[in-house]
């Protein structure tokens, strides 16, 4: 690989040692070498990407520098609308859908000079933790091709891990960026809710969804976030105030920070290698001057339960738009209702159907208060627990995932076991807080382990400061062996 | 306590045309998931803060100013059936 990070690629570009076109050709070549095994991409837009790379080179030659993503090949989870390029959310119901507009994130990438090379695989409508729920086939883990890459943004995680992209974007509703980042040995980050526009992101659970970057380094993650976030009038939940600078404290080190190790995110269900790596990292941080205390957030025990009421409830409402009338699949019927019911039964896969039913149930008359209403009270109680914890510490840490990558097929017949994959991630979604996963090592089978850093709302500067120290301490620079030498 | 689920009613509300066998299978899965989800009922007391936007945003209003909308033909090109600038649906009312 010409460059091992996008910041390095940017330096080489500006020094005239490479071109956007060369970076793109290298990414396309890596994809063509690995895609048969990985299936990280649903669409590779070779022609469109070559045009963008050519433009990026022409601009640089004319002295126009569009910022840190200028000339960088980028992959996007296929639930972000790209004008003129098929966008399916990995669902049959959207097969062949060509969006008539760009998501705000996509417009910002274009105006930032990024080269959009393709759309990555996901669990259908971002519902899942393994990318096995895609209607277009599973993605596999570059570290072990018999295992899942995590999910739902598994394609984006696998593409960055395999070197076919220096930067990819995913969306995180209940861990869908951080968990696959952990399982694929890359950096994955979910921003504060409301800081990255959701306009043009195909909605799953609107009060939880956030777009965020997958990168090889923490610095790249901060640069990528700076390039896409900010107020957008097209998203009514977009934050109009002042934003922190994610890159400001990357070099400050952890000395003087106070962090909390979350008691509830350990013990039963956590693999010993994951717990040992986490404890080792905490000890290393302590040696650099980070003050460590243990904190208990008791409501974390019921966060997963609340999430599996709130997210499906919102999904059942959001996915009502897929009705066979305005876009996508239509299965005819003699009445409009029959047309809708047939279209939806045929167009949605089992996990999406399950969640729509679950959400419809928990919102229905007679069950609303005991399920959905109570889940909202739990959500508020989780926010209170976080507020108490953050009155004592600057950041909270835990494993990103209780396990390393699991075998493909291992959890597909047990929805609840699959849901437990996201147990460490969901609290930050319910609170709307930022969180990041940084790779810290491998288990004895050679599978990556991720370390999660959580911070309060708009605490990205501190979150990245600590994440950068975690990265320095871990010195993780290994590449997937399953694919041979990719870097 | 087993959770009562009228799966045919829920499927109808969700406009999902499922077979009887599919409904039985989903009903069993929902039972397991809802039993776990019912743990939310173990929360005691009323939380003091509202679970709304983490940054405290309430309603957002845009300026009352018209902006260009999406191109109609481009939008309708994605419709399964369109005619004369309209989406086409089966009759919503029964015709005698």
Image (cartoon, rainbow, N blue to C red):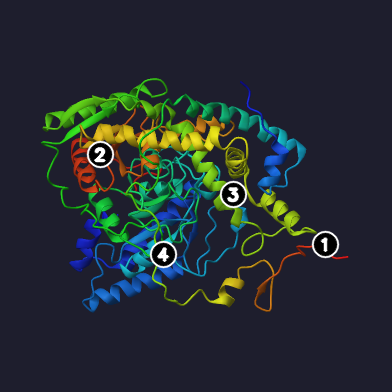
Chain ID for label 1?
A: B
- Secondary structure under tag 1 reads loop
Q: CA distance from mark 1 to mark 4?
A: 39 Å
Q: Which residue is mark 4?
A: A234
Tag 2 and tag 3, C-beta contact below 8 Å: no
Q: Residue A167 sits in which quadrant?
A: bottom left
- Secondary structure under tag 4 reads loop
Which mark is nearer the camera, 3 or 1? 1
Chain ID for label 3?
A: A
Which mark is nearer the camera, 2 or 3? 3
Q: Which residue is mark 1?
A: B94
The residue at the point 29 percent across, 56 percent down is A224
Chain ID for label 4?
A: A
Q: Which mark is residue A377?
A: none
The residue at the point 44 percent across, 35 percent down is A377
Is disc 3 in the same subunit as disc 4?
yes
Query: In this rendering, does residue A147 appear at all?
Result: no
Q: Which residue is mark 3?
A: A135
Q: CA distance from mark 3 to mark 1?
A: 36 Å
**In the displayed structure, does residue A332 sit left or right of residue A361?**
right
């Amino acid at each position: 690989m010409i460059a091992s990070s996008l910041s390095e690629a940017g330096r080489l570009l500006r020094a005239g040692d490479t071109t956007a076109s060369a970076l793109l050709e290298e990414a396309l070549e890596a994809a063509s070498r690995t895609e048969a095994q990985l299936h990280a991409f649903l669409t590779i837009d070779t022609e469109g990407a070559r045009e963008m790379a050519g433009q990026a080179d022409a601009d640089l030659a004319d002295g126009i520098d569009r910022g840190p993503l200028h000339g960088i090949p980028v992959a996007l989870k296929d639930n972000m609308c790209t004008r003129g390029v098929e966008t399916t959310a990995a669902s049959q119901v959207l097969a062949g859908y060509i969006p008539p507009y760009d998501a705000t994130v996509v417009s910002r990438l274009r105006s930032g000079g990024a080269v959009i090379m393709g759309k990555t695989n996901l669990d259908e409508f971002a519902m899942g933790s393994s990318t096995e729920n895609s209607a277009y086939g599973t993605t596999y883990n570059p570290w072990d091709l018999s295992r899942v890459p995590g999910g739902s943004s598994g394609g984006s995680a696998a593409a960055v891990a395999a070197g076919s992209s220096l930067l990819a974007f995913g969306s995180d509703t209940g861990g869908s960026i951080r968990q696959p980042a952990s399982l694929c040995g890359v950096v994955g980050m979910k921003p504060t809710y409301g800081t990255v526009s959701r306009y043009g992101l195909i909605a799953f659970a609107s009060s939880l969804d956030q777009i965020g970057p997958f990168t090889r380094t923490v610095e790249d993650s901060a640069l990528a976030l700076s390039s896409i976030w900010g107020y957008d009038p097209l998203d009514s939940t977009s934050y109009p105030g002042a934003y922190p600078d994610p890159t400001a404290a990357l070099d400050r080190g952890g000395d003087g920070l106070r962090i909390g190790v979350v008691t509830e995110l350990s013990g039963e269900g956590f693999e010993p290698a994951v717990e040992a790596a986490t404890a080792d990292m905490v000890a290393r941080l302590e040696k650099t001057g980070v003050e460590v205390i243990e904190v208990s957030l008791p409501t974390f025990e019921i966060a997963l339960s609340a999430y599996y009421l709130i997210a499906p409830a919102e999904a059942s409402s959001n996915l009502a738009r897929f009705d066979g009338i305005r876009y996508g699949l239509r299965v005819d019927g003699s009445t409009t209702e029959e047309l809708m019911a047939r279209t939806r039964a045929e167009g949605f896969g089992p996990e999406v159907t399950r969640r729509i039913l679950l959400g419809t149930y928990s919102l229905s008359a007679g069950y609303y208060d005991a399920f959905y209403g109570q889940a909202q009270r739990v959500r508020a109680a989780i926010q209170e627990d976080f507020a108490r914890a953050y009155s004592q510490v600057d950041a909270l840490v835990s494993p990103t995932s209780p396990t390393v990558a699991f075998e493909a097929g291992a959890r597909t017949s047990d929805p609840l076991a699959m849901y437990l994959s996201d147990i460490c991630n969901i609290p930050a979604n319910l609170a709307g807080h930022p969180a990041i996963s940084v790779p810290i090592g491998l288990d004895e089978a050679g599978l990556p382990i991720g370390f999660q850093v959580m911070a309060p709302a708009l605490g990205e500067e501190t979150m990245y400061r600590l994440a950068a120290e975690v990265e320095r301490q871990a010195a993780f620079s290994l590449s997937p062996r399953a694919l041979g030498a990719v870097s | 306590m087993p959770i009562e689920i009228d799966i045919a009613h829920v499927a109808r509300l969700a406009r999902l045309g499922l077979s009887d066998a599919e409904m039985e299978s989903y009903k069993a899965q929902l039972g397991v998931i809802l039993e776990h989800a019912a743990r939310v009922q173990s929360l005691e007391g009323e939380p003091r803060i509202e679970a709304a936007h983490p940054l405290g945003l309430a309603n957002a209003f845009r300026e009352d100013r018209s902006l260009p909308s999406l191109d109609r033909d481009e939008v309708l090109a994605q419709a399964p059936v369109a005619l004369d600038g309209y989406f086409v649906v089966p009759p919503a009312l029964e015709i005698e």
